[in-house]
Image: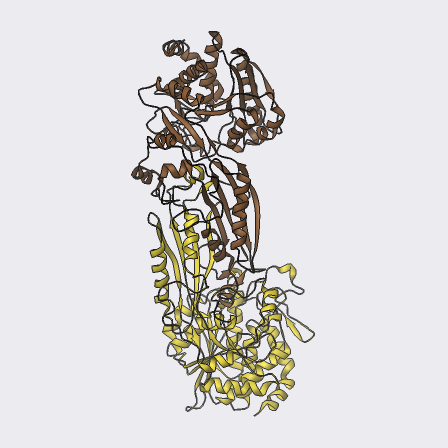
Chain colours: A yellow, B brown
Amino acid sequence: MNKTDFERIFADQKNRYLDEWMKLLSFPSIGTDPDCEQACNDCANWLVEHLRNIGFESRLLLTESKPVVFGEHIGQPDKPIILFYGHYDVQPVDPLEEWNNPPFEPVLKNGRVYARGAQDDKGQFLSALKAMETLIANDCLDVTVKVLLEGEEECGSDGITKSLSKWRELIQANLLMVADTSTVPSSAPTIIMGLRGLIYLTATLYGPSHDLHSGLHGGCALNPAAEIARLVASLHNNDGSIAVAGFYDNVKAPTPREEELLLTGEFDAASYEKEIGVPPVGGERNYSPLMRVGFRPSIDVTGIHSGFGGTGVKTVIPAKAFAKITSRLVPDQKPADCLQAIINHLQAHTPHGMRLEISDTGGVFPGFRLNPDSETAKKAIAVLSQMSDQKPAFLWEGASIPVVVELARVSGADDLLLVGFGHENDMIHAPNESFSLDQFQRSYIYTCLMLSSL
Amino acid sequence: MNKTDFERIFADQKNRYLDEWMKLLSFPSIGTDPDCEQACNDCANWLVEHLRNIGFESRLLLTESKPVVFGEHIGQPDKPIILFYGHYDVQPVDPLEEWNNPPFEPVLKNGRVYARGAQDDKGQFLSALKAMETLIANDCLDVTVKVLLEGEEECGSDGITKSLSKWRELIQANLLMVADTSTVPSSAPTIIMGLRGLIYLTATLYGPSHDLHSGLHGGCALNPAAEIARLVASLHNNDGSIAVAGFYDNVKAPTPREEELLLTGEFDAASYEKEIGVPPVGGERNYSPLMRVGFRPSIDVTGIHSGFGGTGVKTVIPAKAFAKITSRLVPDQKPADCLQAIINHLQAHTPHGMRLEISDTGGVFPGFRLNPDSETAKKAIAVLSQMSDQKPAFLWEGASIPVVVELARVSGADDLLLVGFGHENDMIHAPNESFSLDQFQRSYIYTCLMLSSL
C-alpha cells in the first residue's frame, strides 16, 4: 500500500476517526488532579477496549499511581519490534474562563478540534493508532508493535518510571517511536534528532545565625545574599562558557554530517528576540544559538532567593540564601559525574566561614542523539520526504524527555524516533488547545508509511 | 553641685522616679500599631504635663502622623542651647507568649524594670529628664534646654522628618544630645563617635517577556537570575573592596587621634564569630573589623530574588530578577553622588538585551563623626571619666540614625553627642526588655554632670 491508498482510507474513515477522537477527548483525564482519578481510569479502560477492537491484545498495567495502557500486535518473526509511547493524561485546564468551549466538550471549528488534549497527546497518539488499525485491517502490519500509553506524563511520569525495570521483558523492543513532539514553525515534517539530559540541585549558603542589622555588620559579617550571587556567578566565565572543572570533558562534538544538517535549521535572531523578549545571546559566545541549544550543555539558575523581597527597604544582612540550579547535558556527559562536578565547584568557591548545603539533587538523566546516518533515520527521512513538498527538518532539542530516554534504555531499543506534528499554534498547556484534522491526517500517513517501511 | 550631691538626691528620690517610670511604661505606645493611636496620644499628653510639672514650658507639636512632645527651659543668655532628643514610641511586643509579665505592666525584679520600652527609649530619656528636673529644682540648669520627644522612631520618623524645616527656629540649638544608645559590652561609659550614612535602591533586571522553559532556552536566552547574580557580584572586587567607580573618592580617613582611640576599642574575632555565627571577614580584607565598620563605607545586598523558590525543581528561566541594595556611607561621601555612582555601575554592567530598572531609591543621609578634640567631646570625656573606674570607650558605629543627623543639621547644632547606657543584655526589640535602676542612675548622673559642665 502506498501514500495514495492511505489518503483514500483516511478520507473514507475520517468521520469515524473524528467521533472516536472526540470520545477520547471527553474524558477529563487530568493526571495531577485527584478529582479526575475516575476519569483517568475510565479513559485507560476505554483505550484498552479500543486497542482490542482494532486488533491488539491489550490490558492495563498497574503502577503505584496511574495505570498504563499496554497493547501488543505480533508481527512477522523476522521483523523488528516497535515500542510506541504516548500518554492519555492531559494538562489542567485553568484559567477555565478563557476557554471558548468547555475543555472536555470537543468542538470542530474550521477544520480544527478544540479541547484539552486535542493535540497533547490524545490527538497525536490516536492518529498513530488509527494508522496501526489500517495496517492491521489490511493485513500489512508486519512489524510487532507494542503500545504503551501512560497517565502521568504531565506530572513527572512517576508510576511508569518506577515500574520500568519489572516490565523489561514485556517492553523489549528494537525501536522506540514517540508521537508527542512538534514540527518547526514552517510546519516542515520534523525529526527530533536529539534531547538534552537533565540534572538539578539546590545550593543553600548559611551565614549568620540570624538576620543581622546591615548597619552594625555591613562590611564586617559575611553576607549570604552577596555570596550566593558570587557563587552563582562563578559557574560561568565571562565568555558565557561553563567554569566548572571537567564539565566539558566528555561532550560529544557534532559530526560533520550533523553540523551540515544543523545549518539547514530555521533560526532567526530577530524573530527570537521579538517572540521571547531577549536576544539569543545567553550561553557560550563562540557558538551559534542552534549549536548551543542542541549540542552544548548549559547550567541555568532557575531560582535565587535571599533576604527581604517586599516594597521599600529593610536593612538586613540575611542569615541564609539559596539558588536552584538545573543543568542540561549532551551525550556523552555522565549525569552523575556532572552533578558531582558542580557540587565540587560550589564547595570550592564557598567562602571560609560559611556553610554550603546541597539538597534536592536529582534528574540524573543523560542526553540522547539520533545518528542521522542510522537505518532508522534514513527510513524516517525517506518517509517524511515523500509526505510533503517541504524538505524534512532536523531539530536538536534543548529540552529533556527523561521518561522517553529511560524507556529506550530499559526496552533495549537501539534507536529513539521522535516525530510529531504539533505546532506552536496548537496552544498546548493553554486555553483553547486544538489540533487540526490536517495535522491528524499527516500524523496518520506518516505512521502508516513509517511502520510499513521497517 | 557635684557627683556626690546627685547621688544623694537620686537615693532620696529613687522611689518616686521609679513610680513615674512605671507610669510612663504603662502606655502601650507602639507607634506602628493603629490600635495604639490613643495610647500614643495619651503618652504624649502625659509627657507634656510631666515636663510642665518639672519646670519646662511644654506643648504638643502636631505632625502629619504622631505628635511630638516639645519642652523648653530658658537658661542664661550667655550659655549654649541644648536640644535633647528622645522617643516615646516603642517596638511591637510579639511574640507575646515569651514575655514573663505583660509588656505594659512593668515589674521590678532584682533591680531591673521589665517592660516594653523599659530601656528603649523611655527609661533612657526619663533618666535624663529627671536630671534636668534636679538641676531646675536646685536652680542650676544654666544652659537652655529644648526637649523633643517623637512618637515614630521605631517606624521611620516620618512625622518629625517632614516637619523639621518648619520648626527650624523653634529647635535652633548649639548642641544636640541624644540618650538612645548603648555602652560597649564591658559597660564602660561610651561615646558614639560616629554614625554611617545610608542610601538604598532596588535594581530589577527584566529579561524574557515571560518565564521560559530552561531546556528549550538554556544556553540561548539571557537568564535574569544568573545576570542579577553577576551584576550584584560585580559591585565588589575579590579583595572585598567596592568596585564602583568613584565610590571611595571623598572617604574621610581617620585622623591619627581617631586611629589611636579606635585601637582602644573592644573587639574579639572569636567572640564575634560565636555570637554572630560568621567570622568578621566580610568587606575589605585590608582593614580591621572596627575600621571597616567605623570608617569605611559598605555596600550590602539585603535581598535578592528571582524565579522558583519552592521545594524541588521547576525548570524555568525567570522573566525578571531583583536585588535590594543598601550602602552605608562615611563622612565626607556625598549620598546623592554615591547613589548615582552605584546606579551608573549597575547600568554599565547590565548585559545588552536586558532592561535595568532602578526603584525604591532613598535614605539619602550622610555619615557623621564627632571630632574627639572638640570642646564637646573633651567635656563629655571628662564627665564620663569621673563617673566610673572604667575609662570611657569610643565607638564608631556602623549603623545610621538618619533623624538624628538630620536634626543636628536643621537645628544648626555644631555637635551631636550620643551617650547612652543601654546594654546588649537589655533585650531591646525582644521579649522581656529591661533596664536596671543602676543604668537609670548612671544615665541620670551623666546628664546632671554633662549639662552642668556646658
Q: Is residue A12 above or below residue B360?
A: below
Q: Quadrant of the N terminus of chain A?
A: bottom right
**Farthest left residue?**
B270
**Residue B304 against residue A92 in the figure, above or below:** above
Q: Is residue A87 visible?
A: no
Please, which residue is most extreme toward the front here?
B256
Q: Position of residue A80 (x, y in %)?
A: 43, 87
In the rendering, at what x and y percent does residue B171 appear?
Answer: 57, 21
Number of marks present in the image shown: 0
Q: Quadrant of residue A296?
A: bottom left
Residue B375 visible, this orientation:
yes
The quarter holding residue B187 reads top left
Is residue B112 left or right of A96 when viewed as pictured?
A: left
Report the residue that reaches farthest toward the top.
Answer: B138
Q: Percent from the top left, x then y, of residue A144? A: 45, 86
Which of the two residues, A255 or B351, is positioned nearer the viewer here? B351
Which residue is more in the foreground, A203 or B272?
A: B272
Q: Work out whether residue A97 or residue A217 is closer to the camera in this orientation and state it.
A: A217
What residue occupies the far right of the structure in this picture?
Answer: A110
Up the image or down, A358 lies above or below A175; here it is: above
Measured as percent of width and height from the top left, residue B249 is found at 48, 42
Residue A295 image-quadrant placement: bottom left
